Image: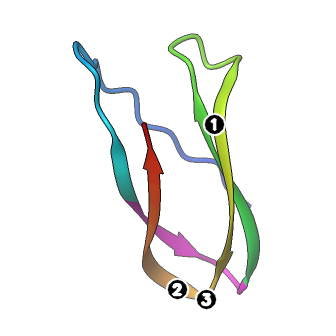
Amino acid sequence: MTPAASSPDVLSDATIKSVYVDATGAGTRTIELLDGDGGNVLQTKDVNLADGGQRVTLDFP
């Protein structure tokens, strides 16, 4: 598994509706939403992924 990150500046309340992932091999993965320091997990979601690219619905408020 290769962790990936994006660090956009968010200036008001937002919801992360979905993300696009490219899984190497099928299986369950944990997607984490981290705070700005990258050290605190704010939310998690376990998802069952197929091999290859796909969109995952998160609905993280």
Q: Helix, strand or loop at disc 2?
A: strand
1 or 21, nearer to the observer: 21
Label 2 vs label 1, nearer the camera? 1
Q: Eyeballing the image, is 1 above or below 8?
A: below
Q: Which residues are magenta?
A: 19-26
Q: CA distance from mark 2 to mark 3?
A: 4 Å
Q: Which residue is mark 1?
A: 43
Query: What separation in Å lies between label 2 and label 1 (alpha carbons)?
Result: 24 Å
Tell whether 11 sits left or right of 5: left
Task: Determine the secondary structure under disc 1.
Answer: strand
Q: Is residue 39 above or below residue 4?
A: above
Q: Secondary structure at mark 3?
A: loop
* Rendering quarter of residue 14: top left
Report crowding for label 1: few under 14, some 14 to 19, many 20 or more residues within 10 A (C-alpha): few
Residue at image mark 3: 51
Residue at (67, 45) in percent of width and height: 44
Say whether disc 2 or disc 1 marks the residue closer to the N-terminus.
Answer: 1
* Magenta run includes residue 22: yes
Total marks in image: 3
Asked whether the residues under the numbered discs 2 and 3 touch, taking CB atoms below 8 Å apart as contact, a structural biologist would say: yes
Lower sequence index among marks 1 and 3: 1
